[in-house]
Image (spheres, rainbow, N blue to C red):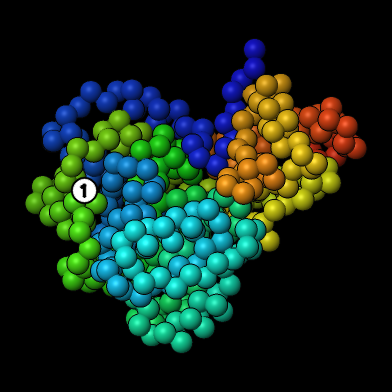
Amino acid sequence: MIKKRLLTPGPVSIYPPGLQAALDSNVHHRSPEFKAVLSETIHSLKKILGEPDQVFLLSSSGSGGMETAVTNFFSPGDEVLVASCGKFGERWIELSKTYQLNGKILQYEYGEPVRPEDIEKNLKENPRIEGVFLQACESSTGVQNDIDSIAAIVQKSNAILIVDAISALATMPLSCSTGVDVLVSGSQKALMVPPGLAFVGVTRKAWARVEGCKTQRYYFDLRRAKKAWDDGGMTSFTPATSLVLSLRESLKAIETWGLDRLIQLTENRARATRAGLETMGLKIFAKRPANALTAVKAPGNDCDKIRSQLKQRFGFQVAGGQGDMKNMVFRISHMGYIDHFDALGVLGGLELVLKSLGYPVSLGASLVAFQKIYDEIA
């Protein structure tokens, strides 16, 4: 028997009590019982998002949250700045083009982080920029951007800062209280819930844009969503009841563990894993690595073989690269319902896989390197 161990950067391993709650979802979405669940869940989400003025829960993937952030705050022709350092940054570019925004694009090589000074330069040169879009964690490359520095820069301008935190929420310090105006996230990452929910936190500064926005929208119309919530504490359309029940349990657990502690453990696990990888002669792809995941340069042309053996021999499922990086990197998640010993297991399995493929590996060396960093926090 081989136990399945999901270490992909979304979907992730699900929190078991949350999964059990989802199975017990025989509840009507307009009933008083579910209204109470929804209220509790939104209240908990507000805490994790840093107490934004409004929180909206959408039945969609994270990309629905991204589309919501484009269509509710900007009108066709508005000037925006999009900073892209990977595949999901490119999604902001695609969305801005789809909704006819006048986008200035800052394009960085894969593996490079967004440079805050570039954001500052562009905002100073063009005060007509209405919004800045970027990722907190670019999960296609394993890059973590310096959101605090960028937020401080954007807040000095008239623009609002829109951050894709789908892979970043609960893996790094991130909050609407520190300068992020629209914070987008999703259920299938660090919150340990199956895919299908997106969240959008909106500050008062950003909400002031909504009524004047001329972009056509229907399902992702936050005016409609706010009215439904204000009038009856409900969503404007049928919510994914089973996922909301699951999310409530995950949020309860995170509150018990402590959000700061969860971030601290994730950061330590990421550093410890990278220390272990480096003992095998493997190179980290990102110049500024994320807490949420690590993208590893695959040696030779063996990316598919490495991933296949990890899964077939040991049950560890890790992700490959995306787009042009499909055969260049594999990605190991540090989030979801996992602990440090899951990460130790991946390293042990990877040593054996590399050895079988003829790479020089000192068995056990990665575990020692991992344990030294884990010992800092254990």
**How many numbered markers are drawn?**
1
At label 1, the amino acid type is: Tyr
| Structural crowding at the residue carrying mark 1, measured as other residues with C-alpha within 10 Å and reported as few (<14), some (14–19) or many (≥20) | few
Compared to residue 78, the image places residue 287 above or below, namely above
Q: Residue at x 50, y 76 (%)?
A: 119
Quadrant the C terminus occupies: top right
Q: Secondary structure at mark 1?
A: loop
Compared to residue 349, the image places residue 171 above or below, namely below
Q: Position of residue 144 (x, y in %)?
A: 58, 59
The image quarter in which residue 371 lies: top right
Q: Position of residue 366 (x, y in %)?
A: 81, 40
Q: Is residue 231 left or right of residue 112?
A: left
Q: Position of residue 50 (x, y in %)?
A: 38, 60
Q: Which residue is mark 1?
A: 219
Q: Residue at x 64, y 12 (%)?
A: 1
Q: Residue at x 59, y 66 (%)?
A: 108
Q: Is residue 119 left or right of residue 364?
A: left
Q: Position of residue 228 (x, y in %)?
A: 13, 50
Q: Is residue 266 visible?
A: no
Q: Is residue 35 visible?
A: yes
Q: Residue at x 35, y 75 (%)?
A: 79
| Residue lying furthest top | 1
